[in-house]
Image (cartoon, rainbow, N blue to C red):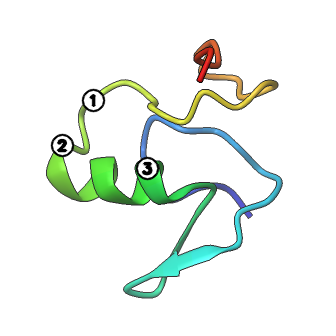
Amino acid sequence: MVCGHPACRCRSDVGLERNGRHYCSEYCAEQEGDNPLAPCPCGHLGCSAGVVASAN
């Protein structure tokens, strides 16, 4: 299963469910609702969207 955010390609730890869709993080779920065309926000290592994890 892949994260519900259109720009996110995380396939592991997609355990958060919102409105029948699954997400890898609370942040992805919120961003998908606010701006689905935004770049992947998750920051998870290994996400093929290429986003680098933040320091915090």
Identity of the residue furthest to the bottom in this view? 20
Residue ID at (45%, 32%)? 41
**On-image quarter of the C terminus:** top right
Compared with residue 17, is residue 23 higher up or lower down, i.e. above or below? above
Task: Looking at the image, tell me whether mark 3 or mark 1 is earlier in sequence order.
Answer: 3
Compared with residue 17, is residue 36 higher up or lower down, i.e. above or below? above
- For the residues labelled 3 and 1, the Cα–Cα distance comes to 12 Å
Asked if the residue under mark 1 is in contact with the one under mark 2, i.e. CB atoms within 8 Å, the reply is: yes
What's the residue type where badge 1 is placed?
Ala
Viewer-side label of 3, 2? 3
Q: Which mark is residue 38?
A: 1
Callout 1: SS: loop
What's the residue type where badge 2 is placed?
Asn
- For the residues labelled 2 and 1, the Cα–Cα distance comes to 6 Å
Asked if the residue under mark 2 is in contact with the one under mark 3, i.e. CB atoms within 8 Å, the reply is: no
Name the residue beneath numbered marker 3: 27
Residue ID at (83%, 53%)? 12
What's the residue type where badge 3 is placed?
Tyr
State left or right for residue 25 relative to residue 12: left
Residue ID at (31%, 57%)? 30
Compared with residue 18, is residue 55 higher up or lower down, i.e. above or below? above
Viewer-side label of 3, 1? 3
Q: Which mark is residue 35?
A: 2
Please rate how many residues cluster around mark 3, counting C-alpha atoms within 10 Å: few if below 14, some from 14 to 19, many from 20.
some
Q: Position of residue 43 (x, y in %)?
A: 60, 27
Compared with residue 29, is residue 10 higher up or lower down, i.e. above or below? above
State left or right for residue 44 relative to residue 45: left
Quick one: 56 or 7, which is closer to the camera? 56
Q: Position of residue 3 (x, y in %)?
A: 59, 55
Callout 3: SS: helix
Q: Which mark is residue 48?
A: none
